Image (tube, rainbow, N blue to C red):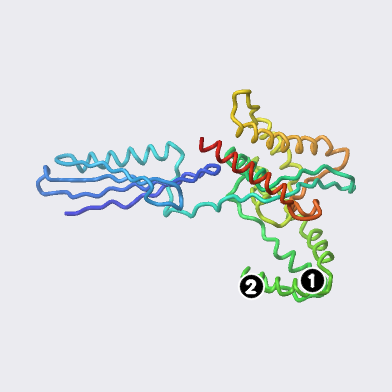
Amino acid sequence: MFQSANKRYFEYRKGTTEKYQIIWREGEYAPNAEDSQYTVYVERGRLGMKNQDARTKEFQGEGAHYQSEQHMDSQIDKCLRTGYVEVDNLGAPTPAIEGRAVTLKALSKDNSDTPSLSLNEFELFMLLNWLIDNEVFDNNHQPLQLEKWMARSLRKLGYEKPRLEPLSAFYEDYEETLGLVDEDGRFDEYWSRYLQMSERDRLKGTLVEEEKVPAYKFTDEKYWIVNIEEIHIISNATEKKIKVPDAKSNKKKHLLYGIQKAWLDFHLELIKQQEISAIYGYEIRPWEDLKGGTQSEEESSESSDSSSEFSSSEEG
């Protein structure tokens, strides 16, 4: 009689590492015990990419049923001990992180002149992945819905409020209404109102109790604000994780350290000025907002060169 055990699914998600294992057993229990035959299968790989590494172990003869069952149990136990979690079905991989050129602009209650830090696509990409790997940033947390503030801001200016459900309908209406706002020359008025009305939500630290910062504040383009509690979390974690490269370190490590050091110095400066300038956080803005235009060809070239050099170093 042919027998097949149900497949068991396991996931491992930590930082940017997302792996899976599928473990199951198939076999035939023969009337003559010596003819019994079982196979234990272990499939493993990266989430989203199946059949990357399939291993099997066969058991034959008398005792094959018991031996294969014991082996499958040991594989499951090993899987769980190494940090995997059993799930009903494999989930989708977390969308890949993409860098973008941004300026981190400190915000203060008295509107005083505050520090800022500009990061190109490569620099932000390296920081995000490093902080996610070190479990300071959480890339699985979904952004808060801010579309309601976009809709209300338009309504306050006298335009028809876009539908909020479903979101696809909202953005269809939003683009159409925004065209009218542009024609009327009122975009700056609309955007200023949106930033003011949505600030409380953009400022929320949804993972502060877990000593983490949601990565969407840097990847989602809605002018999110990193609050003062999150600044302390980032500063403390960066100071603990950052490693000064020695003279023998390769170019990759020196390059990453330079990015991390500028990042740390910015956060330490904000903490230092917190009471003096009434700083309560910093806003993540597209780079061109403060640079008076898009990234220059020279800066873009430098960013691309750095990225290529880093990749080459990693391959070596």
- Name the image quarter holding the N terminus: bottom left
Residue at 67% x, 34% y is 238
Left or right? Give the position of 118 relative to 6: right
Pointers 1 and 2 in contact (C-beta within 8 Å): no
Label 1 is placed on what type of residue? Asp
Q: Which residue is mark 2?
A: 169
Residue closest to the far left: 32
Q: Residue at x 59, y 50 (%)?
A: 97
Please give left or right for residue 75 compared with residue 217 in the image.
left
Dot 2 alpha-carbon crowd within 10 angstroms: few under 14, some 14 to 19, many 20 or more: few
> Which mark is nearer the camera, 1 or 2?
1
Residue 275, horizontal then vertical, whole percent: 86, 38
Query: Callout 2, which amino acid?
Result: Ala
In the displayed structure, 281 sits above or below 202; it is above
Q: Characterize the local packing of mark 1: few (<14), some (14-19) or many (20 or more) Cα atoms within 10 angstroms.
A: few
Front residue of 58/145: it is 58
**For residue 166, side relative to residue 115 (left or right):** left
Q: Which mark is residue 220?
A: none
CA gap, disc 1 and disc 2: 20 Å
Task: Please tell me which residue lies in front, 183 or 172.
Answer: 183
- The residue furthest top is 247
Q: Is residue 80 above or below residue 173?
A: above
- Assign a secondary structure to mark 2: helix
Along the viewing direction, whichever of 240 and 78 lies nearer the viewer: 240
Q: Earlier in the sequence, mark 1 or mark 2?
A: 2
* Residue that carries the numbered disc 1 in the rendered image: 182
Question: Does 12 sit above or below residue 264?
Answer: below
Q: Position of residue 284 (x, y in %)?
A: 74, 50
Picture coordinates of residue 164, whole percent (x, y): 67, 70
Find residue 253 and report its horizontal and vertical position in percent: 61, 32
What kind of element bears circle 1? helix
